[in-house]
Image (cartoon, rainbow, N blue to C red):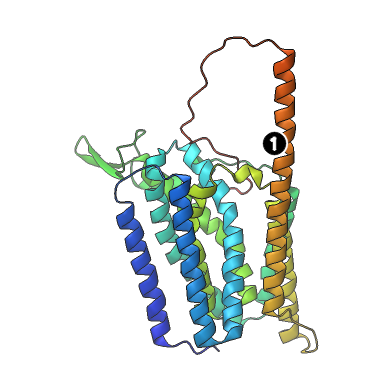
Amino acid sequence: MLEVPVWLWGVFAATVVVSLTVDLLSHRTAHVIRFKEAALWSGLWVSLAVIFGAVVFLVLGSTAGTEYTTAWLLEKSLSVDNLFVFAVIFAYFKVPRAYQHRVLFLGVIGALVFRGIFLFLGVAVVSRFTAVLFAFAGVLFYSAYKLLKDEEESFDPGKNFAVRMLRKIIPVRDEYAGAKFFVKEAGKWVATPLLAVVASIEAADLIFAVDSVPAVLAVSDEAFIVYTSNAFAILGLRALYFMLAGLLDRFHYLSKGLAIILAFIGVKLILQASHKMISPSIPEIPSPISLAVIVVILAGSVLLSLRRSARMGGAEQTDEQGAASATPEQPGPPPAVNDGDSPPGSRGRDV
């Protein structure tokens, strides 16, 4: 059992509270977040996670530090799948871009709470029932299989359970009212679509926790490691979305890479459970090797995706030039205005 000083928990809590406060104050005026601003914030969140990881290395040792880094990178890579769902939700509800950060900010608060509950429960269950690791491995193998199939699944944010429950509790009007979640109509309070968007985002995170929790518990069964690594990955999710929202379709092989990572973590869980329950002679996969495997697979899938995107971009440009030379230019209607709310596509899961 890892002995974590109380002051280290305090440093973590203070870092999260101060960071979220600064973020909230910086975005108190609704505005469209451009790539440059999102990249700056993403860099800040990554820097915070890395600095905290260095503190974990110094205070708790190299093993804990490696586990933290592995868990953070694993959660960061798995969270990319969330971005596709965010894009679909925003497009479905036609959320104005200026209000998307406000929605994701509340989504992060909810994710920190619910993910924490699941993780602490998971740690408690694993510490008492090692056999549950086999079940967790099965969940990861199934998730990996779904990602490898790469099928477009039916996805209707307006029909997910959280939105249905919300509509039963309080009427939801059709029009937005700025950044407000509630307005008064005919003397009665009603919700705006913005609240339905928050409910849909929270429901999506609950679904993704099914993969995330077993995966991170394969890296460490220490509550401090699994929660802090997850928290820092979640905190940077909003900035990552605004930075990559228009580029998601370029990461064609990322889902394949994530599938391989999930399958690898599933194998790690089986070996870990077998080592404890069957025979100590069954080897476990050390954290440094896990970290190296995740880095190599993630980097490889991104590089292959970018190479494919560049190759297809060149082919499309050649086709367009050929069509232009073969067909005389004709006057046509002005190009449609795109406000950026159209989704880049969804990979993935029913919510």
Q: What SS does tag 1 mark? A: helix
Residue 124 image position (x, y, % from top left) = 54, 80
Please count the marks in the image. Answer: 1
Do we see residue 300 in this rendering? yes
Residue 273 is left or right of residue 169, and the answer is right
Residue 45 image position (x, y, % from top left) = 46, 63
Residue 288, quarter of picture: bottom right
Name which residue lies at 75% across and 33% down. 315
Residue 112 in the image: above or below residue 337: below
Residue 187 in the image: above or below residue 82: above
Seen from the viewer's position, the closer of residues 71 and 22 is 22
Q: Residue furthest left?
A: 187
Residue 175 is left or right of residue 156, and the answer is left
Residue 112 image position (x, y, % from top left) = 44, 65
Seen from the viewer's position, the closer of residues 329 and 42 is 329
Name which residue lies at 68% across and 63% down. 140
Name which residue lies at 36% across and 62% down. 20
Residue 238 is left or right of residue 220, and the answer is left
Seen from the viewer's position, the closer of residues 172 and 58 is 58
Q: Which residue does the numbered mark 1 point to in the structure image?
A: 313
Residue 137 is left or right of residue 111, and the answer is right
Q: Name the image quarter holding the N terminus.
A: bottom right
Q: Residue furthest right?
A: 281
Name which residue lies at 40% across and 61% down. 109
Kind of residue at disc 1 = Gly
Residue 210 image position (x, y, % from top left) = 59, 62
Question: Callout 1: few (<14), some (14-19), or many (20+) C-alpha neighbours within 10 Å?
Answer: few
